[in-house]
Amino acid sequence: MERVGAGTIRTTCPYCGVGCGVLMEPDGKGGARVKGDPEHPANYGRLCSKGSALAETLGLQGRLLSPQVDGQDTDWDSALDLVASRFARTVAEHGPDSVAFYVSGQLLTEDYYVANKLMKGFIGSANIDTNSRLCMASTVAGHKRAFGTDTVPGTFEDLEEADLIVLVGSNLAWCHPVLYQRILAARKKRGPRLVVIDPRRTASCDGADLHLPVKPGSDVALFNRLFVEIYEGGALDQAFLSHTTGFDATLAAAYADDVTQTGLDEATIRAFCGLWLGTEKVVTIFSQGVNQSSSGSDKVNAILNCHLATGRIGKPGCGPFSVTGQPNAMGGREVGGLANMLACHLDLEDAAHRAAVRDFWQAPVIADQAGLKAVDMFRAVGDGRIRALWIIHTNPAVSMPDADRVRAAIAGCDFVVVSDITGATDTARLADVLLPAAAWAEKEGTVTNSDRIISRQRAVLPIPGQARPDWDILAEVGRRMGWGAAFDYANAAEIFREYAALSGIAGGFGRDFDISGLKDLSDSGYAALQPTRWPVTDGRAGGRFFADGRFFTPDGKGRMLPVSWKPPAAKTGKRYPYRLNTGRIRDQWHTMTRTALSPRLSAHLAEPFVEIHPADALQLGVRPADLVALDSPAGQAILRARITDTVQPGELFAPMHWTGENAPSARIDALVSPVTDPVSGQPESKAAVVAARRFAAGWYGFAISLQPMRPTGDYWALARTRAGYRAELAGSGPVPDWEAEARRIFNLPQAEVQMVEDRGRGIARLAFHHKGRLLAALFIAAEPVAVMRDYLATLPGEDAPGVLSGASPADLPDPGPTLCSCFGVGVNTILAAIEGDGLMTVEAVGAALQAGTNCGSCRAEIGALIDRARPREAAE
Ligand SMILES: Nc1nc2c(c(=O)[nH]1)N[C@H]1C(S)=C(S)[C@@H](COP(=O)(O)OP(=O)(O)OC[C@H]3O[C@@H](n4cnc5c(=O)[nH]c(N)nc54)[C@H](O)[C@@H]3O)O[C@H]1N2
Ligand SMILES: Nc1nc2c(c(=O)[nH]1)N[C@H]1C(S)=C(S)[C@@H](COP(=O)(O)OP(=O)(O)OC[C@H]3O[C@@H](n4cnc5c(=O)[nH]c(N)nc54)[C@H](O)[C@@H]3O)O[C@H]1N2
Ligand code: SF4
Ligand SMILES: [Mo]
C-alpha cells in the first residue's frame, strides 16, 4: 500500500473522468480526512466540491452489508450458487444470448476485465454492455471511424498550452471542475481564449470570450461551416493531408450543409471561425452535448474532420479532446466492456483477434458477433429474450431512457441480480438477488482517466459486513459455473498482470492500447504503482498520438468523413411544443446514491427543477417557485420551475439526478424516448420533446426533521441537511387532517405537537418536540410556502420555540441557498458582500467570506453574481 507519511494513503477520486489524486487519512473510526494529492498529474492537489466532500459519504448508513435473496439476508454460498446455477441453466435451456450483464464505467479495470472475460469468453455471448453506452459510445464510434481505434490523442497539458479552447456540449465548470480550474489558471497566466458551444448559458460560459447558443442537435452544421472556412481561408495543412483520406467528399458535404440550422447569427459564426482559423493551438473539448444525440457519431467526426484538415492533432496544445465522464469510462473502453468490442481495443469482428483472445484466455468459446447495446438489451429484457440479467454498479431504472419501461422490464425479468453498495435504489429494489459490493474506499484496483492516465484506487477503510469487491464476486460466479482455472484470482494485481499481458498481444496486432510493460509488475509494484499514461511498452511510454500522421486504419491514414446535419429524432409540434435538454448539476453525482449523503453537497440545489425561459413562463402562467408538469410521448414528471434566460425560448433544461428514492415525480428519464444514434447506439438523452403546464397544486409544503421521513403528495423531494432532512411537498388532493398526515410523514405517532391552522386560507403549521428539542416541523400553504428554508433546516435537534413563525430571529439574516459548499456560504451572504460591501472581484469575496477559496467549484457562480451587480452599479 502506498503510504504518504504516517497513515495517509494515495488513491483516486471515484467520480469524474478527471481522475484526481486523493490523499486519505483514516481516522480509525470508519471515516477519513480527504485532501487533494499535490503530486497527481491530473489535479496537482486540487479537488472540486464533490471530491472535497468525499469524507461525508463514507458512513455505513444505508449500506448493503449482506447478500439477499428475495429480500431476505442470506450467506454468500447460497447467493452465489443460486446466481451461477440460474445463469448456467438459462444458457443451457435458451442459449448464451438469453443472459446479459449490464455494467458500468465506474467499475475498476480489474472488475471490468473479469466481467468481460466471463461473458465473452466463457458464457460465449457478447451480451455485456455498459452505461458507457449512454455516455461515450458516440465518441468511441467517431474515433474508430477516423483513427481506426478508440484513441484520445492528447493530454491534459494540452489544455494549458492551447491558445484557444472550445467547449462543445460540455459544462466543464460543473462536470470536470478541476480541469476547468486548470484552464482558468492558464487563462490568467497566458490568456488563451475560451469559446462555449451549448444551447444553454452554463456556468462554463461565465468568463468565456464567446458563447454560441446553438439550436439543439445542430453542431454538425456549425463544424461543417468551419470546415469550409478552413478550406477557403487557407488553413489546410497540406503536408498532414497526405496522411489522411476523404477530404474531397468531406468538403463537398460541408459545402452542401446549412449553417442557418444552428440558429446563430452570421457575425457570431464568423467570430468563431475567425478565432479557430487564426489560432494554431486549438483544443476542442467535447462531451455529452455531442455524444448523447441521434447524430452523436457524426458530431464527433465533424469535429475530428476540422482537426485532421489542419493537422492540429497530437501536438502540444492542439487536438480534439473527448473528456470522459465516469472515473473508469476510459478503462472500460480499453477492457472491451461494450457489447461491440473485444478486449484491449481488439475487434470482435476480426477472426484473428478473436482467436488470439480465446487462446490467451484458454476459453471454451468466444463471442463472434456483437451483443445487444443497452437500449436494445433492455428491450430484450422486456420481451423475454433475455431471461437472466446481472446489473453491476449502475442504476438503469433511473438513468436509461424510457426509464418507466426499463423499470417494468427489469421487474418482469425471470432472474435479476444487482450488485450495489446499497439496496435503496430504484434498480436494487427490483432484484431477485442483491449482492453487497465493497465501495471505492475499500477496494484495490485501477482506473484510466480522460487523458489515458492509469491510477490506483487503494483500500483505505476495512470492507464492512459481508461486502466483497466486484471482481471477487464475478470470479466466484465464474468458478461456480465450472471455469475454476480461468477465474482463480488471488487479488486485483493478478488480474491486472493478465490484462497487461493480453494488451501485449493487441500491441502485436498494431493496436494502440498496449501496457505490456506492466505485465510483470509484482504485487508490491502494483501496490506502489504511480499514475502512468498508456501506452507502456518497451519502446513507448505515454505521450500523444497521430502528430506523426500514423493512424490505426487498414491503410494507416486518418479518415475524414463526410457528414451532414440532421435534426433531433423527436420533432416538436403542437402536442409537444418544448425541447427538453437534460444534464448535470455541480454537486450531485448521477442517481445520488453517494453525493446525496453529504449535507453540504445537498445544499447547493436541494430540489429537482426545470429551467424555463421567462417568455415561456409568462405564456404558461408559471410564476417563480411554481411546479411544472411535463409530459412526453414516454412519460410524465413534475418539477420545480426555475425561470431563467440561461435557456432559450422553447427549450427547457432539467437535471438527471433525482430518483424514486428522493423525488419520485422527477425521474427525468421517464420523459426521454429511447431513440439512438444509428452508428453508436447511444441514446439521445438531450433532445426529448415535451408539453408543459403549470401544476395546480391544492397545497404546498415544506418539512424538516431530525430522522428520515416519508413525504407524501403528487410531488415531493427529500434532501439531507446537517441537522437531518428537509423536504418539499405538494399535492392536488385535499388532506383532511394535517396532524395525522404529519405524524405519518415523520413517523411520530406520539410526539408532542404544536400547531396553528387556518383552514379557510389553507394554512397549517405543525412542530413536534421531545423534551424541548425540535423533532420535525411541517409548513403547509395554498401557495408555494414562503419560509426561511435554509434557516429552518438548521433547527431539528435544537430548542426552537419560535419555529412555527417560519423565519429566523431578526438579528439572524437568512443566508439563502448554499453556493460555496466547502465553507457553507449562502447566496444572500455573498450578495450582501457584493452589493452591500462593494466587493467586486471573486478574490475580494473570498478574502471576506472564504467562499470560493477551497475547491473553487463555485467561483464561476460568484463571478456571475458580481457581473449581474455590475451593470446596475454602472447605471447608478
Ligand atoms: N457534477 C457532476 N459532474 C459529473 C457527473 C455528474 O453526475 N455530476 N457525471 C460525469 C459523467 S458520467 C459525465 S458523462 C460528464 C458529463 O459532462 P457534460 O457533458 O459536461 O455534462 P451534461 O450536463 O450532461 O451536458 C453538457 C452540456 O451539453 C449541452 N447540450 C445539450 N444539447 C446540446 C447540443 O445539441 N449541442 C451542444 N453543443 N450542447 C448541447 C447541455 O446544455 C449541457 O450544458 O460529467 C461527469 N461529471
Ligand atoms: N436524461 C439523461 N440520462 C442520462 C444522462 C443524461 O445526461 N441525461 N447521462 C447518462 C450518463 S453519461 C451516465 S454515465 C449514466 C449514469 O447513470 P448510472 O450509472 O445509472 O448512475 P449512478 O448513480 O452512477 O449508478 C451507480 C450505481 O452503482 C452503485 N455503486 C457505487 N459504488 C459501487 C461499487 O463499488 N460497486 C457496485 N457494484 N456498485 C456501486 C451506486 O450506489 C449506484 O446505484 O446516466 C446516463 N443517463
Ligand atoms: S474534478 Fe472533482 S469529481 Fe472529478 S475527479 Fe476531481 S475531485 Fe473528483
Ligand atoms: Mo457519463
Image (spheres, rainbow, N blue to C red):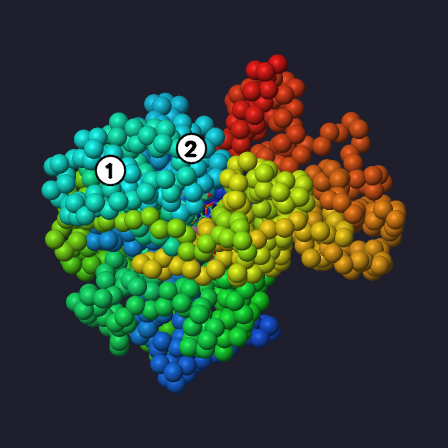
Q: Which quadrant holds the C terminus?
A: top right
User: What mark, if any, has residue 228 been given in the picture?
Assistant: 1
Neighbor class of circle 1 (other Cα within 10 Å; few <14, some 14-19, many 20+) is some
Neighbor class of circle 2 (other Cα within 10 Å; few <14, some 14-19, many 20+) is many
Q: Is mark 2 within 8 Å of ligand 1?
A: no
Identify which residue, 439 or 318, lies in the foreground.
318
The answer to whether 611 is drawn above or below residue 68 in the figure is above
Q: Amino acid at mark 1?
A: Val
Q: How many numbered callouts?
A: 2
The answer to whether 49 is drawn above or below residue 777 in the figure is above
Describe the element under mark 1 as helix, strand or loop.
helix
Is 183 left, or right, of 583 in this rendering? left
Label 1 to label 2, Cα distance in Å? Answer: 21 Å
Residue at the location (62% across, 58% down)?
664
Q: Nearer the viewer, mark 1 or mark 2?
A: 1
Residue 429: give x, y in percent of width and height. 58, 67
Q: For mark 2, what is the residue?
A: 211
Residue at the location (33% across, 48% down)?
565
Is 402 left, or right, of 39 in this rendering? right
Q: Is mark 1 within 8 Å of ligand 1?
A: no
Residue 124: give x, y in percent of width and height. 31, 74
